[in-house]
Image: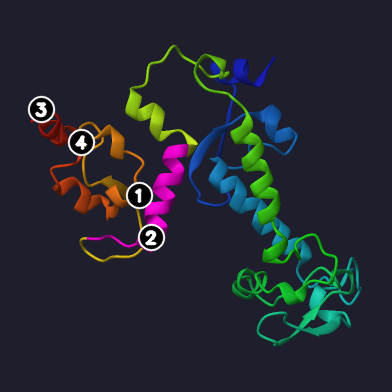
Amino acid sequence: MGSLARMLQGVTVLRACPVCDVQYDADPGRLKHNRQTTCSRKCSYQFRAKKTAEAVQGRQSPFKGVKTGRPSWNRTAGVYINCGHCGKEMRIEPNQVGRKKFCSKSCFFAGRELKGLFQKGHVDLVPPEKRGHSDETRRKIAEVQRSKDLKGEKHFNWKGGKRSERQQEMGRYRYRDWRNAVFARDNWTCQLCNVRGGYLEADHIKPWCAFPDLRYDVGNGRTLCKPCHVKLDTHGPKALKYKES
């Protein structure tokens, strides 16, 4: 007969909990195997903890005074080096020699920009003047690209001429050369507010739509910043009034 069947038939034993002294019904079969000795799980945990404390009371641990496992990292001899950024003396493990160079994260992020920390021939030790293509190589690449007649239908990205004439011209080398010449003449400075640098635009003094003969005349261009350019009547659709007149 199982414990559930005995409890349903009323075959139980009334006993007091050894922890809280509450009367509860216990199964004789489970008590025989030293189970259900308390009224609840909470009391069971407390009862087992009490029995364990009584069993080990006055007994010395067999591992007391015995050194086991790996020693703590700060109890070995270690190696002392100076931080690669602040120069502070710090202690590292022997297996960290050559790998750990900084004493903290702040020194790590600040010191990794110092190229003098790396040895000659390191992949990151590349002088700025040797990065990328040289001026001569860039000039040769530009000449080759300009010599290729990849315009209109000959270009691989041709989409049937969706762009306007102005948009097509602005993407060609002739317009880029004119714009760069205007910027260089004005020293990349807005001609209205005298602010140098930033987002600049090359404006046609005599609008593009009304004076086609002066489109690529450097004397007809001026350097303007975006806020100053939009205020003029030569910006965008406002320039159409010159064409109508």
Residue that label 1 marks: 218
**Callout 4, which amino acid?**
Gly
**Callout 3, which amino acid?**
Glu
Direction top: furthest residue: 160
- 9 and 154: which is toward the camera: 154
Residue that label 2 marks: 185
Residue that label 4 marks: 236
**Residue 204 position in % (x across, y down):** 26, 44
Residue, x 44% and y 11% (percent of image)?
160
- Crowding around mark 4 (Cα neighbors within 10 Å: few <14, some 14 to 19, many 20+) is few
- Crowding around mark 2 (Cα neighbors within 10 Å: few <14, some 14 to 19, many 20+) is some
The first of marks 3 and 1 along the sequence is 1
**Residue 150 position in % (x across, y down):** 57, 23
Direction front: furthest residue: 213
Q: Main secondary structure of the magenta part?
A: helix
- 213 and 232: which is toward the camera: 213
Which residues, given as a range, are shown in magenta? 174-191
Residue, x 27% and y 54% (percent of image)?
224
Residue that label 3 marks: 244
Q: How far apart are marks 4 and 1 (CA)?
A: 20 Å
| Residue 132 in sight in this render | no
